[in-house]
Image: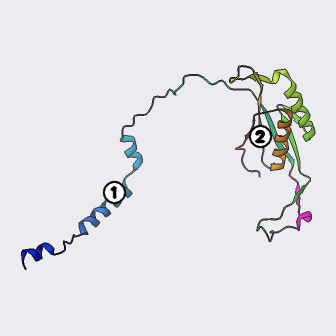
Amino acid sequence: MTALEDAQEEAKMDMTPMIDVVFLMIIFFICIEFKVLESKLDAFLPTDKGSQNTVVEPEEQLSIKIRVETKGTPDYSKYGGKGINDNTGRPNRFVLKGHKVRWEVGPKPLGSIEAVKAELDRIANDPNSLIPDKKTGGKKLMSCVIEAYPGTFYEDVAKTNDAANAAGFKEVNFGGGLGPGK
């Protein structure tokens, strides 16, 4: 073989050491505990003071609780009976018979949505329900929180929200995290 033929011969690389290194790296990353590693790394985090040192004052808000008194029973007769809808693949709609809820607007228990509307109107028109508005410097109506307890339906919450909006509450929030019903 001449020097020219040696130079033109294709150079082949042995991949065995490269594969060994990759397998060793895989084993290393499987075995290492990253939490231990993270605790050893220096992190230059900001101090515990935020970007502002102003204290946010809590705002007064009205609590509206919706509790179920009677769960009710589903009546499927209006929508084709109990079962699955052939068109949508979802369970058929139903109407709840005997479903009854009780509202608590602040500390006051109420038994009908009409009574809730009247109470919210009364509170919205009471000058004592106005709180300082930090944006304008004037006064605004306090916000309200609707807390739906387990067993309530969207319709109950929607009616309550509509009543709050009709009374003039501009900021309506929803509480949650009360868990599933029994």
| Residue 111 shows up from this direction | no
**In which quadrant will I find the N terminus?**
bottom left
Q: Of all residues shown, which one is farthest toward the left?
A: 2
Residue 99, percent from left and from top: 89, 51
Q: Is residue 22 left or right of residue 98?
A: left
Residue on which the image places disc 2? 147
Residue 52, percent from left and from top: 54, 25
- Residue drawn at (70%, 22%) of the image: 136
- Residue drawn at (6%, 77%) of the image: 2
Q: Secondary structure at mark 2?
A: strand
Q: Is residue 125 left or right of residue 61?
A: right
Q: Which is nearer the eye, 88 or 104? A: 88
Instruction: Examine the rendered structure and indicate whether residue 177 appears above or below residue 90.
Output: above
> Looking at numbered disc 1 in the image, what kind of residue is underneath it?
Phe
Determine the image quadrant of residue 61.
top right
Label 1 or label 2, whichever comes before in sequence order: 1
Q: Secondary structure at mark 1?
A: helix
- Residue drawn at (81%, 68%) of the image: 85
Magenta region: 71-80
Q: Which is nearer the eye, 170 or 49? A: 170
Residue on which the image places disc 1? 28
Q: Is residue 55 magenta?
A: no
Determine the image quadrant of residue 36.
top left
